[in-house]
């Protein structure tokens, strides 16, 4: 049951990444585009971290030390990128909020 929940969270984060990238592609204003790209970075980082945790819990491919090292590196990169994304999001959000929305 826990493995199924992890797979659902992984797929949700991957789907949210694609939605954020699509919104960034369709947006014309620069700060909103940066905001949606930052959201995409956060979702992709969450995907990477959840994938690493799933590998650690499931144990697939973790018969060797290299498998554990790869999983730990993926987890550290995912969490690190998420932290950077949240910091960037907090800086960009006020600018994107003040930016006028151009409608065609």
Image: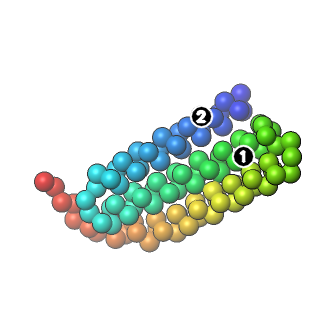
Q: State left or right for residue 97 relative to residue 53.
A: left
Disc 2, SS: helix
Disc 1, SS: helix
Q: Position of residue 26 (x, y in %)?
A: 28, 51
Residue shown at the point (59%, 47%) measured from the top left: 47
Q: Residue furthest right?
A: 64
Q: Position of residue 94 (x, y in %)?
A: 37, 69
- Label 2 crowd (10 A; few <14 / some 14-19 / many >=20): few
Q: Which residue is mark 2?
A: 8
Separation of residues labelled 1 and 2 (CA atoms): 13 Å
**Rendering colour mode:** rainbow
Q: Residue 53: which numbered mark, if any?
A: 1
Q: Residue furthest top?
A: 1
In front here: 89 or 67?
Answer: 67
In front here: 72 or 91?
Answer: 72
The first of marks 1 and 2 along the sequence is 2
Q: State left or right for residue 98 relative to residue 89.
A: left
Residue shown at the point (35%, 55%) measured from the top left: 24
Q: State left or right for residue 12 relative to residue 18.
A: right
Q: State left or right for residue 71 relative to residue 97.
A: right
């Amino acid at each position: 049951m826990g493995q199924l929940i992890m797979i659902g969270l992984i797929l949700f984060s991957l789907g949210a990444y694609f939605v954020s990238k699509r919104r960034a592609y369709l947006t014309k204003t620069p700060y909103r585009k940066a905001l949606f790209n930052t959201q995409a970075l956060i979702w992709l980082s969450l995907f990477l971290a959840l994938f690493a945790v799933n590998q650690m819990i499931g144990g697939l491919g973790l018969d060797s030390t290299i498998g554990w090292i790869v999983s730990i590196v993926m987890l550290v990169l995912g969490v690190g990128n998420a932290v950077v994304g949240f910091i960037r999001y907090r800086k960009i959000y006020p600018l994107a909020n003040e930016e006028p929305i151009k409608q065609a």
